Image (cartoon, rainbow, N blue to C red):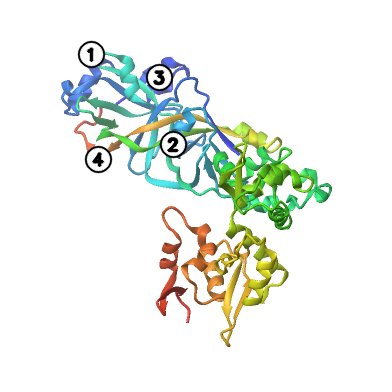
Amino acid sequence: MESDSETNNGTQDKQEDMSFVKSTAEIEETLRLFRIHTDNVKPLTYALYSTEPLDKPSEQFMILEADDHILKSIEAGECVSFRGELDEPAVLCSGTRSYEVKEAETSSTCLLIPSIDEMEAKAGDLSEKKMESVQILGVYSKYFEIRECSPKLGKLVRVLEPTAFKGLEYENTIEKSALLDWDKVKSIIQASDGEILRHIPDLLVVEMNGYFRLISFEFEARAVPLMLDLLEANSWEIDEVDKEESYDSLKEIIPKPVFECLFAKYASPSDKTKKDGTKLYKYDEEKSTKLLARMLLTGCPSNNLSDFMEAWQIGCPPALKPKEEYLYGVGIILEDDMRRKRVNLFLECDLSDNLSTRLDQLFKAKPKWTVKEITPYLEKFSTSRQDVNAILTKFARQATVNGERFYCSKHGR
Amino acid sequence: MILLKNNSKSSIPEWMAIDVHGSIKCSHHLSKILFGELYKKKDGDIVCAIGTHILEGHEIDLEKPIIILKKNLKSQYQSKNKTEADASHDIAAVIRKKLVFRSRPIMSNISSC
């Protein structure tokens, strides 16, 4: 090996990098001393040197274990970024996927060098042994790894709440500086562009005049009944809703993007078309009646079930038939000591975002649930790997009463 | 938002990692130090000579690619004053291969060479 004296003199130019490089004869001598057969060794050999101390990780680099999707996105020139605010754990987003970022550590030390395979290819065929100096570019033992996660969109509703759309007459009370545009949404929401845009209609978020706005429940509760009233006013059959005409009748009250969003939530194309071929629509019975039930229950949170069912039917257009099961997610049906049934307001969105706290809340409100009854309350925790049934199997106890399957608290009475 | 910026005109430079067990201790901090020498055998095995020690190993393909980001300290500093969208990390390289050593170092029978 070279002695240190060789490195002491000289300038910091490329020439000096050569100071570690051995001649062909020296390489062969070294191999002989190491008892390695010269013929077995490829002609190009390497002297690894560093200009930085090797006992400290390089501060200039961040090491990220990615995956093929991220790498392909970068290579294709797509936007890949870390998102979120300073106090949040980092999330890495491509155009379509989100990943949690976690720090990991290895017990070994990794040295970074340029690819020696590439150097070998560049050198071509060599007739005799040659040594090339290779600079160690960095050192690391800690790195970041990523795991694909579901987009974190809960925050979007929270940050848009203060500027929620309540109706055109309230628009001048909204602070313009508090409104969020696409750039702002992108920088604070930890989800990819594709995921944000795909999920915002489900969250009742629309883009209006360049800003992202949440449709408030108050406005939804005002607009949807007006839309449903058009059924009777125009004597439309349930599956003969004319979208164009609905919008025209209500455009004074409901702005276009809000109408589009609400209409997409409550109606879907039916099999019928108009004479000129334009599509006709059909209101979703469950969603529409559920909204009306929520409005009734918000006004009066506890009711005798049969009285409630009567009032609910009166509130609905005659073409829509409320059913007890449509209450799941907005109200719970309880039996009192006299076996009289009551319905109480119990909204999914009022419960905790933490699964175990939510299960406690659910079993406290009602000790025994059927799968169908509890599903709307647990749906948001289901993933491709764990559906509602799996969650219940894991966190609840199963019981069968009179042939019907119920779930109750794992640790309950 | 911190953008991962790819400044390379053609493909991202390819680096590799040498995985050495434990940590490295440097007794002196010269401006330039020799770490060791690498010899590649024709069967693909790698010999790394560090001082009078020999490490035998081979190249492995990484299951997941590793991206080396160069922290853009200047833009991070600026981002405090300007909008956060200005912050970015440059992509310095990608690693798909790693040299790993299978055994403990072998002491060669030479004291100097």
Q: Is residue A304 above or below residue A203?
A: below
Q: Which residue is mark 1?
A: A128
Which of pointers 3 and 2 lies earlier in the amino acid sequence? 3
Q: Is residue B76 above or below residue A330?
A: above
Q: Quadrant of residue A65?
A: top left
Dot 4 crowding, Cα within 10 Å, few <14, some 14–19, many 20+: few
Q: Indicate which label's residue lies in the foreground, 3 or 2.
A: 2
Kindly state the secondary structure of the residue where label 1 is placed: loop
Q: Amino acid under label 4?
A: Arg
Q: Residue furthest bottom?
A: A338
Q: Which residue is mark 4?
A: B102
Q: Quadrant of residue A32?
A: top left
Chain that bears disc 4: B
Whether tag 1 and tag 2 are in contact, CB under 8 A, the answer is no
Q: Amino acid under label 1?
A: Glu
Q: Which residue is mark 2?
A: A69
Q: Which residue is mark 3?
A: A17
